[in-house]
Amino acid sequence: MPNLSAIKIAIIDDEPSIITMLQMVLRREGFQQLYGASTCAEAISLVQRVVPDIVLLDIMLPDGSGLELCSKIREYGNPYILFLTAKASDLDILKGFAMGGDDYITKPFNPLEVAARIQARIRRLEPEALAVSAAKYPDAGIYRFGRFTVNEAEGELTVKGQPIACPAQVFQLLLHFCRHPGIVFSKTQLYDKVWGINGQGDDSTVMVHIRRIRERIEIDPGDPKLLLTVRGLGYKLVKEPEER
């Protein structure tokens, strides 16, 4: 488990009480580098200054949209972005993912759930362990699937030899499939294994992330040959395109 005190978390919300509440809860969980901003302008300045590892981002801010802000934040790094939103329609959720978000939680929320999601995210990264493994075993954590390769230690996806930008949660989902080729996973199982959420989550979250993977690794995302839908069961990643 990484050193929690070294992880930088930015909380961007127009309600100071929410920032204070989340900082208090996260501090109790062991996080120390906690930063707050209440506007888009403050958030950009904050992100430039501290380059956070995790961003908790409200969609509705007084001087702009958190959705647009999300794209700007991506210009300064690749943090895990969790939207905090009172908007819970499918369209709003899809917009959030399209703009570069990794996950979302609707208001009102339990701050302990936010802390749990962050903890689950961090457990799946384990950068120190990956670095040690990569040094001892150069091919460990490298998954080759014909036209694309995933390097776990470096957090890199390459397609036909070219590095492809991949948001953090999309990469984690792809990595899970790479670790278990040929295995069918239901949406509920993916929420548990990748998002760290027990029980059934929102269907659109998994579907959007599956689509974003296909846009990166498939020749034709509309007719996938590698990351397949198994009707009524879930999804699986295959080493070679299957005959149909």
Image (cartoon, rainbow, N blue to C red):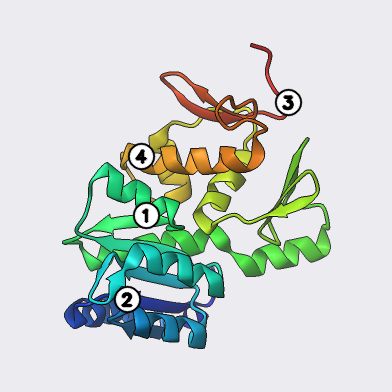
Q: Label 4: state its secondary structure.
A: helix
Quarter occupied by the N terminus: bottom right
Quarter occupied by the C terminus: top right
Q: Amino acid at mark 3?
A: Glu
Instruction: Specify which label sits upstream in the sequence, 3 or 1.
Output: 1
Q: Nearer the viewer, mark 3 or mark 4?
A: 4
Q: Label 1: state its secondary structure.
A: helix
Q: Which residue is mark 2?
A: 12
Q: CA distance from mark 3 to mark 2?
A: 43 Å
Q: In the image, which disc is placed on residue 96?
A: 1
Task: Name the residue located 43 percent from the left edge and 57 percent from the top edge.
Answer: 99
Instruction: Specify which label sits upstream in the sequence, 3 or 4.
Output: 4
**Horizontal side, residue 134 vs residue 35: left or right:** right
**Horizontal side, residue 101 vs residue 38: left or right:** right
Q: Label 2: state its secondary structure.
A: strand
**Is residue 208 visible to us here?**
yes
Where is residue 202, by image quadrant? top left
69 over 30 or under it: above or below? above
Q: Which residue is mark 3?
A: 240
Where does the image place residue 176, in percent across and percent down from the top left? 57, 44
Q: CA distance from mark 3 to mark 1?
A: 32 Å
Where does the image place residue 76, in percent across and percent down from the top left? 55, 75
Q: Amino acid at mark 2?
A: Ile
112 over 38 or under it: above or below? above
Task: Name the residue located 34 percent from the left edge and 37 percent from the top edge.
Answer: 203
Instruction: Specify which label sits upstream in the sequence, 4 or 1.
Output: 1
Q: Which residue is mark 4?
A: 204
